[in-house]
Image (spheres, rainbow, N blue to C red):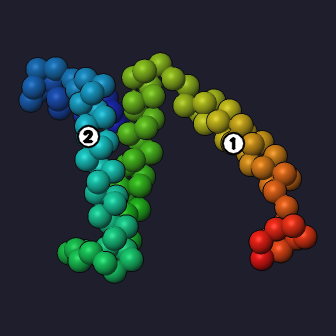
Amino acid sequence: MEVRALYEILENRINGEVWTTNELMLGFSNDIGTVARLLLAHSGTWDIDGDAGAELEHKLAESIWWVIVIAERLGIDIATSFTTTMNSIESGLRGAIEAAPPSGAPGTAA
């Protein structure tokens, strides 16, 4: 949030106000598009200048930052929400795995 506070100082100086939540999401959306292009570059299907791996590391880290900033703006405790969500997904997956017969088991397609 210290980095976001610095951006807010800059936004106030340039625009006279800080970005809205919608503007934050627009910035995040732009970075998501950049991550997609960097994934293509990392796999060799999109040519870029520079180190695709290093740029991908930067943009993925920045994407986590966007989520934290937006959650904070919305009053969401993202750490708690993340833990709760992952526990729920894990529980559902474990149940689905237990219910699904192993591949090649009698009565399943091989």
Res. 9 visible in picture:
no
Tell me where residue 35 appears, x and y as whole percent: 34, 58
Q: In this view, does 108 lie to the left or right of 53?
A: right
User: Which quadrant does the C terminus fall into?
Assistant: bottom right
Residue 36: image x %, image y %? Answer: 34, 60
Does any portion of residue 69 appear in the rendered image? yes
Whole-number angstrom distance, CA of label 2 to CA of label 1: 28 Å
Please identify, in this view, whether the residue under mark 2 or under mark 1 is nearer the observer.
1
| Image quadrant in which you'd find residue 39 | bottom left
The amino acid sitting under disc 1 is Ile
62 or 101, which is in the foreground?
Answer: 101
Q: Name the residue under label 1.
A: 89
Q: What element carries label 1?
A: helix
Q: Residue at x 84, y 51 (%)?
A: 99
Q: Mark 2 points at which residue?
A: 27
What is the x, y in percent for residue 56?
37, 63
Relative side of 48 to 105, left or right: left
- The relative height of residue 10 versus residue 65 in the rendered view (above or below) is above
User: Where residue 106 is drawn, which disc sits there?
Assistant: none
Instruction: Say which amino acid is labelled 2.
Output: Gly
